[in-house]
Amino acid sequence: MADLEQSAVRPGSAPEPSRAGTEGAPYLEAIREYARRDPGRFHVPGHKGGPGADPEMREAFGEAALALDIPALMQGIDVGPEPTPFQRAQELAAEAWGAKRSWFLINGASQGNHVTCMALAQMGDGIVVQRNVHSSTIDGLVISGLRPTFVAPELDPELLIAHCLTPESLDRAFRETPGAVAAQVVSPTYFGAVADVRSLAEVAHSHGVPLIVDEAWGAHLAFHPDLPEHALALGADLVISSTHKIVGSMTQSAMLHLGHGDLLDERVIDRSVTLLESTSPNSLLTASLDAARRQAAVHGEELLGETIEALATARAAIREIPGLEVLDERMTGSPGVFAYDPLRLCIDVRGTGRTGYQIAPLMLELADINLELYAENVIVAVFGVGEDASRSSARLIDALRQVVDRLPPSSEREDTLFAAPPQWGALAMAPREAYLAMQEVVPFREAAGRIAAESLAAYPPGIPNVLPGERLTADLLDYIQSTLEHGGSLRGASDRKLETIRVVIERS
């Protein structure tokens, strides 16, 4: 970390990430050395590095993975002369992403959103939040007790998908929310839209508060010059980074990056991380973050260049398939779209006369293709930094051709949903108050007008349609029911069949 601290860094800016953080993987190397020594393991876990594991588990996971499953507080790994390999791994991550400090998270970017809310709650109780945040942010509001003012993102009038928040909307929300301690926004979105983070940061800072960016889908942006700039480089104060999504660490691993401004207290964030992390962190997850950082910092520009080129070729090929179109940089300049992330392959299926809910199951049936997301008008495929994108995109394109060839002619969309998602209900109570209030279970169809006591989020993308504390409307209930009938799934509901819903008992 000394090298970073000695560098000339302007407040709100960051070092060039491609020139930093390229050292080896110290944490990964440390746990490999521990396993190589074959020490006496008179500690947890009970499988003892493999010998005590179920045979099928050992066969499935492999001897090496089990040998590297090492608990915390081990000499030479995360205990001993400082910086320990664990500390150095986090320092290298901070250098690679241009952060003042980075934390490894072993409960995904969801943990980062929880940590953020807990840290902000020590500054006050009001926060401005982009309404299409991930459901884990709403969970963080419940945990922390923060009282949100929600701001609507821009809605694409044709595709009916949410884009990013505009600086004008954020400024208006701050003026309507005196005492707000921060703003939290999303960039990039599930569909590849990138916000004007620099302007959003300027707006937040003009009101004297930090800008938090849920950059779960943008961990790779720091590592190629042809990609949109990443949030830390544009003045964000805290960034949640779902490293596993694109950069390639193991599922459930993520990072939290602190910017170089002075609006957040590093010690408060560290305390919140400690509060919300497991006391038994998985060394495989941590080591995968260390290794993914090394690959991105050392080889990221080369690997991302190959992927960007492969996906440009794939987009051209998809446009040749009757009825299909792709989203790309042509979106830039639309309301709420400052730039576009080319690693999101988002396909517009409206021209086929079918919905994504109909096309995605056919792709699975005919070609064993599993998509990241499918909705009414679009389907989304995700590509990682290190994969052979030419090969994998060719398989995807072949599956799309098969599906389109199998579709019978249709001049009209079948079984479409609403023309646009209905407006969410008014926030009648803070999310925490509603979640902990006296409740009752009522039939879902009879819940209009009641205050929700739980979240309902179509998943993916995990953006809540209903929040604890919002008053339910008939249109919204119909929309959620229709989404499920068309193949969507739901997170947050205590009744997964959605025959009932938990609502607040209101005092008369």
Image (cartoon, rainbow, N blue to C red):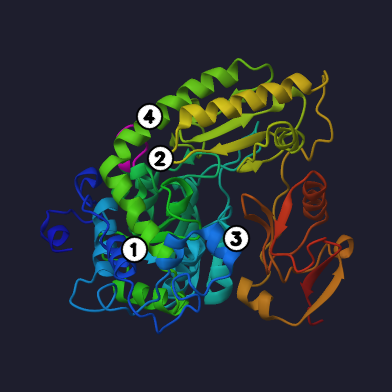
Residue 242 lies in quadrant = bottom left
| Residue 17 is one of the magenta-drawn residues | no
Q: Where does residue 16 sit, x and y in percent of width and height?
A: 21, 45
Disc 3 designates what residue? 135
- At 26% across and 51% down in the image, what residue appears? 96
In the image, is 191 to the left or to the right of 7?
right
Q: Of the residues under marks 3 and 4, which one precedes in the sequence?
A: 3
In the image, is 30 to the left or to the right of 245?
left
Disc 4 designates what residue? 306
In the image, is 114 to the left or to the right of 155?
left
Q: Secondary structure at mark 1?
A: loop
| Residue 227 is one of the magenta-drawn residues | yes
Quarter of the image with the C terminus in it: bottom right
- Mark 2 vs mark 3, foreground winner is 2
Instruction: Work out whether 308 lies above or below 67.
Output: above
Mark sitting on residue 386: 2
- At 51% across and 32% down in the image, what residue appears? 334
Q: Secondary structure at mark 3?
A: helix
Q: Where does residue 52 sit, x and y in percent of width and height?
A: 51, 75
Mark 2 belongs to which amino acid?
Gly
Q: Of the residues under marks 4 and 1, which one precedes in the sequence?
A: 1
- Mark 1 vs mark 2, foreground winner is 2
Residue 387 lies in quadrant = top left
- Mark 3 vs mark 4, foreground winner is 4
Mark 3 belongs to which amino acid?
Ser
Between 264 and 1, which is closer to the camera in this rendering? 1
- Magenta-colored span: 223-229
Question: Could you classify mark 4 by the number of other residues whose Cα lies within 10 Å: few (under 14), some (14-19), or many (20 or more)?
Answer: some
Question: Could you classify mark 3 by the number of other residues whose Cα lies within 10 Å: few (under 14), some (14-19), or many (20 or more)?
Answer: many
Question: Could you classify mark 2 by the number of other residues whose Cα lies within 10 Å: few (under 14), some (14-19), or many (20 or more)?
Answer: some
* Mark 1 touches mark 2? (CB < 8 Å): no
